[in-house]
Every structure is written in C-alpha cells, then in structure tokens.
Image: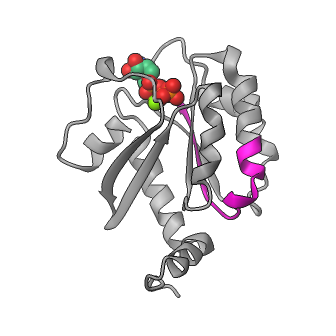
Amino acid sequence: MEKLKSLFSNLEGIPPDRIVPTVGLNIGRVEVSNSKLVFWDLGGQPGLRSIWEKYYEEAHAVIYLIDATCPSRFEDSKSALEKILRHEDLQGAPFLILANKEDLSEAVSAEEVARYLDLKKLDERERVYMFEAVSAYNGMGIKESVEWLVEVMERSKRTEMLRVRAGGTPGPSA
Ligand SMILES: Nc1nc2c(ncn2[C@@H]2O[C@H](COP(=O)(O)OP(=O)(O)OP(=O)(O)O)[C@@H](O)[C@H]2O)c(=O)[nH]1
Ligand SMILES: [Mg+2]
C-alpha cells in the first residue's frame, strides 16, 4: 500500500525496510483516474483474518496479495481466497489477485502461482478478476493493475448499489 500511495500521489510512502506486519487496519487514500479511492489494508496473519469480513459489505472491490516467495503458504492462500470468493457479502465485487515480490529471484513465477491457486477454475462470467505479477518494492505491475481495477469498479453493479445505498448520486452510467 505504501508503494501504491507513492505511485499515485506526490507523497512518499513509508520506506520498505520500515514497514511492519499489519495489525488492525491501515487506511490509504489516493486518487486514481479521477476516482477517490480508500484502501483498507488488512493483515494476513491467520489470527487477524476473522476481522476481514467486517469490511466486506462496504467494499467495492478486493485486492488479494500473495507472497510469491513463500510456496509453503500457497495452499493456505488458496483456501483463504476461495473462502473470500464464496462470501455472500462480496457478491459482484471485482477481484485483483496479485503475486507479490516478483522482483526477487527466488519468487515463484506468476504462472506457477496461478496454477497453485487453481485460478483457471474461476469462471470469468461469474467473477470479474485479474491476476498479475507485481512488486511492492519496485512498483512493477501495480499502476496498471490498480487502473484496471478502477475501470471495472466504475462499471460494476456493485459500485452502483453501494453508491445508492450510501445516499449518493448514482454514477453517470446509471
Ligand atoms: N523484495 C520485496 N520485498 C517486499 C515486497 N513487498 C513487501 N516486501 C517486504 O516484505 C516484508 C513484509 O511486507 P508487509 O508489507 O509487512 O507484508 P504484508 O503482506 O502486508 O504482511 P501482513 O501485514 O502480515 O499481512 C517487508 O519487509 C517488506 O519490505 C516486494 O514486492 N519485494
Ligand atoms: Mg501488511
């Protein structure tokens, strides 16, 4: 998220060596393609996952980040992802699934991560999603994939529904 902030605003994020594991919630605000985005960064440690679902109902989209250098956790990442995808409070939410740390030579290739996660069984007619190799360290892949997410979010029925529910004006596409 710190990289994201620095890519989309003039603010420098916290340097990578000073980032500590997320406990609770980090909030990031950036403007991308004229949309004001609010990122809720939730910690991935198993003991912290029970709080994830408190944010589902109000989330327009989901970014799911996988550490590509840690194959021993792929199985766990896969089942956690499947559980989120199934959750009824996230119906219609576009998913951006990222294999992170692809700047490191020990990282498993994005293709292989996708295979581990069994992404091909994700039906694109049922779920709008994109899978991308990124590096939060050097920024590779982040700008493009977040811009994709904003584009699909703007067109999504879920965004429309959340806007109406919030009492705002439906977007121009309504
Ligand atoms: N080389 C490299 N290091 C990274 C990258 N992304 C994160 N790191 C480093 O990995 C460590 C863990 O990063 P975090 O951002 O705390 O990881 P996280 O996924 O948010 O972990 P939780 O908050 O526990 O869910 C930090 O020291 C980061 O600097 C990356 O793309 N490349
Ligand atoms: Mg974190």
Q: Which residue is found at the position 56% from the left and 17% from the top? A: 69
Residue 116 horizontal side relative to residue 156, left or right:
right
Q: Quadrant of the N terminus?
A: top left
Q: Which residues are magenta?
A: 83-100
**Quarter occupied by residue 78:** top right
Q: Is residue 97 in the magenta section?
A: yes
Q: Where does residue 49 sit, x and y in percent of width and height?
A: 63, 35
Q: Is residue 171 above or below residue 10?
A: below
Front in this rendered view, residue 32 or 81: 81
Farthest residue, direction left: 10
Give the colour scheme of this rendering. one colour
Q: Where does residue 108 sit, x and y in percent of width and height?
A: 61, 19
Q: Which residue is found at the position 43% from the left and 30% from the top? A: 135
Q: Where does residue 92 sit, x and y in percent of width and height?
A: 68, 64
Farthest residue, direction top: 106
Q: Is residue 113 in the magenta section?
A: no
Residue 72 horizontal side relative to residue 163, left or right:
right
Residue 127 in view, yes or no: no
**Quarter occupied by residue 73:** top right
Numbered-mark total: 0
Q: Where does residue 140 sit, x and y in percent of width and height?
A: 40, 35
Q: Which residue is found at the position 49% from the left and 13% from the top? A: 105
Q: Which residue is found at the position 76% from the left and 42% from the top? A: 82
Residue 158 in view, yes or no: yes
